[in-house]
Amino acid sequence: MTDHPARKQDQAKLLVALQDLDHMIRDAEDAKTAAKMQEMGFTMDGIAEIKKARVELTEHIKPQLLNRYQRVSQNYERIVVPVVKDLCTGCFAKVATSFRYEKTAVVTCESCGRILYFT
Amino acid sequence: MMTSQELASYFRESLCIFDLKATTKREALAEMVEAVCAEYEIKDRGLILEMLLNRESLGSTAIGKGVAFPHGRTLAVRDLSIAFARSARGVDFDSTDKKPTHAVFLIIAPPQDRDNLYLQVLGRIVDLIKDDASRERVQAASNYAELKSIIEGQGL
């Protein structure tokens, strides 16, 4: 298993990394994006590697969080969203200031249910 | 269509490195990500580096003629960010033509990037570099003013 920079940190970062990977996979599998990339000269034929990296990453995410991520993904394209000026940037609902001080817990928006990422 | 001036406006002096120390792809990416994180006060540099390395696993972004375009989207950045690096001795960037890379354009965008702006920016830079004269000038640029004038003056 490869070393993961966020592994020893918090689970929220692992969820961000998971979403980044999912976006990458989606782009690589999207015919329009892939064609545009190819036109520019980029190859995207290592999709199997990326999917393998995804599997490895999920092994480090707590099952209940992974379930939450998958549940939210059924409703929204952006599952993990940044909090900007105390607002969830998914639905723009106000986020309780106290959540910012939750150092270890993964916090979800009380309004839309998306997972919140404090930058 | 994005103008040359608009494209040039994404380049910041503090994010242009003209004496890259790195000799490997990982080191080069780390050095450039470090600059981006310092400029924008980003705390999760590991997430950016991991995303970029994953993108490289998908296919090398060094598409030959001494230039690489590492790119991708991550929630770790708030806005579209571009960094440039030049290496006189060259970096082993796993280039498609197996030659050392002398110029690196790093493009990172957030997932909420509207209209895939980063793809437009990437396309514009690739177009610039496809022109032999522009590419040679970029690879020889030794300061920010020079680089910016090449980008602004491309007339695309």
Image: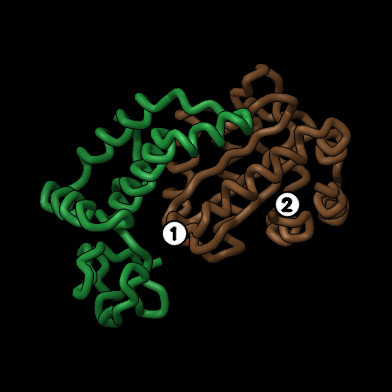
Chain colours: A green, B brown
Q: Are marks 2 and 1 in contact (CB under 8 Å)?
A: no
The one nearer the camera, B141 or A67, is A67
Give neighbour class at mark 1: few <14, some 14-19, many 20+ (Cα, 10 Å): some
Q: Quadrant of the N terminus of chain B?
A: bottom right
Q: Please provide percent x and percent y for residue B155.
A: 85, 49
Q: Is residue B3 above or below residue A53?
A: below
The residue at which mark 2 appears reads as B16
Residue A79 lies in what quarter of the image? bottom left
The disc placed on residue B89 is none
Disc 2, SS: strand
A81 and A35: which one is in front? A35
Q: Which kind of residue does numbered mark 2 sit on?
A: Cys
Quarter of the image for residue A91 reads bottom left
| Disc 1 element | loop
Query: Residue at the spot x=20%, y=64% of the render?
Result: A105
In the rendered image, which residue does mark 1 sit on?
A: B112
Q: Nearer the viewer, residue B110 or A56?
A: B110
- Mark pair 2, 1: CA separation: 25 Å
